Image (spheres, rainbow, N blue to C red):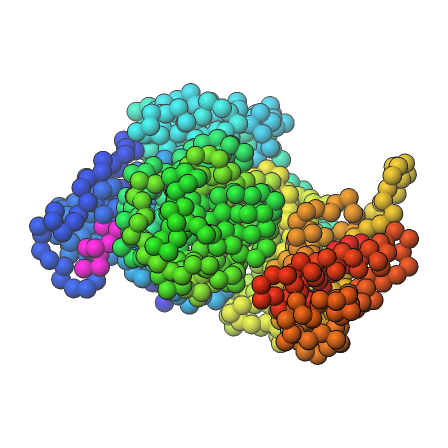
């Protein structure tokens, strides 16, 4: 029955594609002119017949279709006129045949544009994203139940069962030659570059009106090589996209498209002829092989974008334009300037002098829509280059350093929010600062604003905690002449450095549930990599699945391996799995083998039919070699099922130590040692929720190795924050407070309790005895430490209404956040 339904659907797909194709033929793809938006004033056809058509009538999707597709797909067109402004009911009926309500990303409308049919931008991926966003908004793309792993897998196509070594790997560079002297530069490139069919549109120097990515016909042979890698197959040259597009009459350069396709086929065949398939040692126990792009796309449909009005996913990967893929017209596209580079896996790297900015005209839609709702959110996935940069603006909607509507910035280890409202100044002051949560790693940062709660900051799905110093207000004073800019201020003097992987602006304040949903959806180009191990395990349709993605321009991220059978009726028996390694291009990388020590077994008790069995909680990074289109991955095992490969690890030769003078005699405690030390001193358990949460947030920012020469300013910031948290919990908990500071009265005023030396010793002596200790040749004397602490206590106690608990926490944190707990 399922096969019959699939066959019927394929027939329907073919029919609709034929209708869509009627408008393209073999002519060069042209940019569609922008027509007037279909407003109530310009529309004179029959009224919407029901609520569904009314929603379509008022949607950004209909505006996009009218503007971009109306010339060919209006009233009277063979497909029913899904972009017609003459009858919205007929347009809606025609559109329903082209969209997939359950999986908008698989809609025929999206697929056709991604395939190159009249995309109005230089990036077909971004055209597809805009249409997908419009369809999601039309059918209701808000909070949805997360699909199970099995549900996600059944929506995709299983990868080919290709043996390792049955694949030819493309050369590493354009000029690398095979054993027959063939290279990309002397075979495929001349066909792409020297004939008019490709170079007319697919080069950075092509006329703007027809310029299209990928730039596989660029004057730069290396740029052309990188763009063409995913477009040709060395194992099946005839199935290469470069060949099939010509056979489909796409921009042929002679009167015979068949002859042009054969010319391209011969060039690819010549390159393949000089490359031998990879061979593996016979003793290795391996899975099947696949490339990153042969994996199933991991669905990103669980995001909540119901209020998104500008969205940047950084998928273009070429050129100087970052496209707004929200689907909300007018598009607020941004232009790169200065030192900004595309990053593999979807992102941009902003460095000194770089920024990405929109025009004031296009940015006006932000002010118009946000002033109408009185609330907004700015959502960012960012990886700061460091946690020492100050006055560094990640996202700003402003007109210079003295005037803004809204800004999300970094101030060293803190995130900062500035919003103009009726309760703040024109520059958004006073600002809202988060605790020290910024890390030099990928983080999800969200600023929300509404009239009741004012500004709120969230980091990695959790509220940052600090309250807005000003109450909420109205946004009626927002200036619609400002511009949206990423990585800097419009004036160029508030530089932020790091990687941006996603930015969105919403015209509503996201709820905590929506923020956590978007955080869980993650970001970037992610794939389910299914390695077939059926023959090795004896489990029918058995796979080991990784979530894989290109982590940056130099590496891949593999995460959380899971065993799952594609047959829902199967439950595996006891199957041992040991010594799993990730293979790449016929070998095993020396680094990143986090699963080499794996010792586990499949078990019916641990296996879930919908989610499989998790093999490991950890992820690992593997170095990129030839690129995501060419790198071939596989898994190898020391033992799996009844198959075994006895490995003899080479014994490394210990080199003669270098005679390095001046090595330090001391080191630093690592992250876990610091955590345990603070717990032992204060008596606060490491499992206490407040300190456990802080530790998990700061773990990556604490020292990872004991080498004192690797100690960074960010390490000290994290240690200080850990000390503050432990001391706060200790003082606020009567049992631990009485044990540590037995003479402390938290109800007494600080000025009175600590006026004398005896009063100060209530804090100083326990800290000397329990935290600092004695016996080190290089430590300060008790008198020196006592004097420093007494001065601190006097300073804090002199403040108006100072309370004893606050002074005790500060004195404790000053000692525990110092070298007394750090130096080992």
Q: Residue furthest bottom?
A: 735
Q: Is residue 602 left or right of residue 339?
A: right
The rendered magenta stretch, by its main secondary structure, is classed as helix
User: Which residue is painted at 33% across and 42% down in the image?
Assistant: 363
Q: Is residue 61 magenta?
A: yes
Image coordinates of residue 18 in percent, x first then y, are: 26, 45
Image coordinates of residue 804 in percent, x first then y, are: 65, 69
Depth check: 765 or 25 in front? 765
Asked whether the viewer can see residue 796, the reply is yes
Q: Is residue 604 left or right of residue 82?
A: right
For the C terminus, the quadrant is bottom right
Displayed quadrant of residue 695: bottom right
For the N terminus, the quadrant is bottom left
| Count of numbered circles in the view | 0
Image coordinates of residue 123 in percent, x first then y, are: 38, 38
User: Which residue is painted at 43% across and 47% down in the image?
Assistant: 407
Asked whether the viewer can see residue 167, the reply is no
The relative height of residue 705 versus residue 50 in the rendered view (above or below) is above
Q: Is residue 245 left or right of residue 221?
A: left
User: Which residue is painted at 48% across and 62% down in the image?
Assistant: 467
Depth check: 250 or 58 in front? 58
Image coordinates of residue 649 in percent, x first then y, are: 81, 50
Which region of the structure is painted magenta? Answer: 54-62
Q: Is residue 424 left or right of residue 576?
A: left
The relative height of residue 206 versus residue 734 in the rendered view (above or below) is above
Depth check: 391 or 35 in front? 391
User: Which residue is painted at 42% across and 68% down in the image?
Assistant: 145
Q: Is residue 320 magenta?
A: no
């Amino acid at each position: 029955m399922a096969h019959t339904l699939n066959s019927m659907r394929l027939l329907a797909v073919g029919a609709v594609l034929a209708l869509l194709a009627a408008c393209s033929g073999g002519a060069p793809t042209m940019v569609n002119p922008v027509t007037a938006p279909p407003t109530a004033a310009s529309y004179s056809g029959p009224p919407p017949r029901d609520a569904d058509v009314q929603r379509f009538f008022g949607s950004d999707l209909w505006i996009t279709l009218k503007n971009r597709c109306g010339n060919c797909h209006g009233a009277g067109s063979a497909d029913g006129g899904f972009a017609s402004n003459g009858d919205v009911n007929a347009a809606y009926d025609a559109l329903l045949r082209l969209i997939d309500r359950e999986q908008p990303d698989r809609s025929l409308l999206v697929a056709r544009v991604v395939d190159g049919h009249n995309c109005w931008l230089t990036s077909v991926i971004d055209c597809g994203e805009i249409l997908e966003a419009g369809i999601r908004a039309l059918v209701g793309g808000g909070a949805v139940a997360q699909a199970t792993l099995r549900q996600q897998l059944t929506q995709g196509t299983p990868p080919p069962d290709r043996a390792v070594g049955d694949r030819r790997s493309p050369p590493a560079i354009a000029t690398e030659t095979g054993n027959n002297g063939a290279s990309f530069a002397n075979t495929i490139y001349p066909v792409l570059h020297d004939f008019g069919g490709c170079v007319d549109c697919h080069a950075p120097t092509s006329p703007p009106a027809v310029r299209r990515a990928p730039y596989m016909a660029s004057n730069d042979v290396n740029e052309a090589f990188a763009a063409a890698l995913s477009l040709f197959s060395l194992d099946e040259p005839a199935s290469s996209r470069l060949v099939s597009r010509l056979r489909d009459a796409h921009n042929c350069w002679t009167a015979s498209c068949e002859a042009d396709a054969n010319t391209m086929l011969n060039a690819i065949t010549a390159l393949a002829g000089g490359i031998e398939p990879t061979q593996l040692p016979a003793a290795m126990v391996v899975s099947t092989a696949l490339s990153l792009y042969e994996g199933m796309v991991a669905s990103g449909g669980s995001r909540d974008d119901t209020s998104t009005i500008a969205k940047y996913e950084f998928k273009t990967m070429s050129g100087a334009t970052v496209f707004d893929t929200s689907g909300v017209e007018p598009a607020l596209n941004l232009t790169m300037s200065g030192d900004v580079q595309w990053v593999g896996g979807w992102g941009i790297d902003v460095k000194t002098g770089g920024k990405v900015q929109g025009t004031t005209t296009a940015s006006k839609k932000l002010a118009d829509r946000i002033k109408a709702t009185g609330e907004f959110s700015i959502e960012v996935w960012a990886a700061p280059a460091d946690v020492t940069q100050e006055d560094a603006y990640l996202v700003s909607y402003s007109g210079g350093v003295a005037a803004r509507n809204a800004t999300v910035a970094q101030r060293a280890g803190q995130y900062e929010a500035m919003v103009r409202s009726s309760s703040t100044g024109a520059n958004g002051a006073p600002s809202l600062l988060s605790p020290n949560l910024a890390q030099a790693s990928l983080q999800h940062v969200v600023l929300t604003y509404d009239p009741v709660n004012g500004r709120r900051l969230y980091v990695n799905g959790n509220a940052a905690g600090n309250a807005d110093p000003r109450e909420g207000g109205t946004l009626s004073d927002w200036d619609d002449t400002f511009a949206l800019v990423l990585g800097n201020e419009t004036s160029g003097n508030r530089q932020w450095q790091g990687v941006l992987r996603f930015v969105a602006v919403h015209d509503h304040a996201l709820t905590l549930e929506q923020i956590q949903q978007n955080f869980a959806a993650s970001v970037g180009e992610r794939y389910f990599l299914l390695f077939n191990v059926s023959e090795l395990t004896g489990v029918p349709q058995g796979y080991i699945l990784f979530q894989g993605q290109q982590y940056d321009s130099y590496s891949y991220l593999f995460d959380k391996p899971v065993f799952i059978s594609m047959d829902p009726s199967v439950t595996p028996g006891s199957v041992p799995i040991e010594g799993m390694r990730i293979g790449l291009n016929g070998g095993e990388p020396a680094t990143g083998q986090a699963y080499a020590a794996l010792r586990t077994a499949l078990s019916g008790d641990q296996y879930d039919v919908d989610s499989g069995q998790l093999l490991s909680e950890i992820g690992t990074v593997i170095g990129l070699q030839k690129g995501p289109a060419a790198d071939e991955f596989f898994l190898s095992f020391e033992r799996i099922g009844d198959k075994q490969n006895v490995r003899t690890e080479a014994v490394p030769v210990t080199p003669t130590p270098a005679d390095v003078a001046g090595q330090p005699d001391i080191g630093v405690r690592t992250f876990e040692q610091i955590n345990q030390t603070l717990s032992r001193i204060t008596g606060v358990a490491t499992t206490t929720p407040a300190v456990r949460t802080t530790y998990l947030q700061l773990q990556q920012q604490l020292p990872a190795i004991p080498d004192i020469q690797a100690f960074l300013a960010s390490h000290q910031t994290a240690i200080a924050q850990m000390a503050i948290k432990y001391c706060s919990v200790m003082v606020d908990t009567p049992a631990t407070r009485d044990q540590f500071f037995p003479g402390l009265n938290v109800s007494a005023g600080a000025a009175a309790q600590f006026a004398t030396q005896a009063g100060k010793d209530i804090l100083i002596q326990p800290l000397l005895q329990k935290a600092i200790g004695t016996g080190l040749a290089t430590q300060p004397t008790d008198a020196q430490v006592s004097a420093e602490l007494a001065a601190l206590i006097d300073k804090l106690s002199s403040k108006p209404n100072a309370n004893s608990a606050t002074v005790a926490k500060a004195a404790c944190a000053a000692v525990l956040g110092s070298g007394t707990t750090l130096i080992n």
